[in-house]
Amino acid sequence: MIIKSLFRITSHKQLVDVDNVSTSIDKVSKHVLILDGEMPVSISSFIEDNPIGTLIVVDSFGKKNYNAFDIISGAETHLKIVKHLQIYNTNALLCIPNNFLTFQLNQKLEHTPKIFQVKVVTLSDRAHRGIYKDASGPLVTGMITEYFKNIGKNVAVNNIIIPDSINNLTDILESAKEDKTDVLITTGGTGIGSRDITVETVEKYLDKKIPGIMEMIRIKYGAEKPNALLSRGIAGTMDETLVYTLPGSVKAVKEYLTEIFKTLDHLFYMIHNIDNH
């Protein structure tokens, strides 16, 4: 994408043509709207809703698919795509800047699709020693892969088997936080046995808990099978990572993920402070 023209929406809701640089350190854009090929005759609704912003008219979007969380680079910092829009029959990409950024005429912008990073961790002494083959971890991987395919997003899944070890799990949590892993799912270790250490270990790393998901799952499935009420699984956020601790059984994994998937995509927007309404 090559920038053909630049405009700014000022704090007074005026549209200003910019000849050289679209932003200054005193005027950081709240939103950036990239328009495909031409400026619509009227963009009054966008101006009304977004009193401060930058409008970029480019040569063409091409035929690529543009999804939320994809990155547009080429300025001083990256733009994160919020959503694809149509404004008066003109295609547009609504983006948010990380912080101060500068655009220039004839500047080339690059589109990088977002690949969601998911870590799946099976905690099991016996599976780690090879006494039996792990079934729950591969099931999580398969269901996650299918889910992302259905919502049109790219995903890379890393499946790990570790013993029921606080140290091993702590290392993975630290790594996931540092790497800004999008989703971390554990399976196993949510019971009350002496080796069930998953919940206590993960809980220390959570910034915010999301109790409603796990409570609803326990009540829904525990109404028919009371043993389902005994799982202590939790969910929450760790910086920009969504964390879920699932029981170790294949049946429980299917039940939990079926319910978790109903809100997962919305949580991606929430954890990145994106208003997609």
Image (cartoon, rainbow, N blue to C red):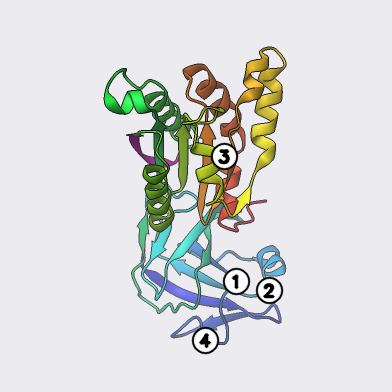
Give the residues in magenta. Answer: 153-161
Query: Which label was assigned to residue 30?
Result: 1
Residue 14, placed above or below residue 155: below
Q: Quadrant of residue 227?
A: top right
Q: Name the residue under label 2.
A: 51
Upstream in sequence: badge 3 or badge 1: 1
Which residue is rendered at x = 59% and y = 38% of the image?
Answer: 234
Marks 4 and 2, how far apart at CA: 17 Å
The residues bearing labels 1 and 4 have C-alpha atoms spaced at a distance of 13 Å
**One can see residue 115 in this view:** no
In space, the residues marked 4 and 3 are separated at their CA atoms by 36 Å
Image depth: mark 4 or mark 3 in front: 3
State which quarter of the image contains the N terminus.
bottom left
x, y percent for residue 161: 34, 33
Q: What element carries label 1?
A: loop
Q: Distance between the residues labelled 3 and 2?
A: 31 Å
Q: What residue type is labelled 2?
A: Pro
Would residue 129 be found to the left or right of residue 59 on screen? left
Q: Which of marks 3 and 1 is in front?
A: 3
Q: Earlier in the sequence, mark 4 or mark 3?
A: 4
Label 2 Cα neighbours within 10 Å, binned few <14 / some 14-19 / many ≥20? some
Is residue 249 visible in the rendered image? The answer is yes
Q: In this view, does 186 lie to the left or right of 44?
A: left
Give the numbered dot on residue 25: 4
Q: Mark 3 belongs to which amino acid?
A: Leu
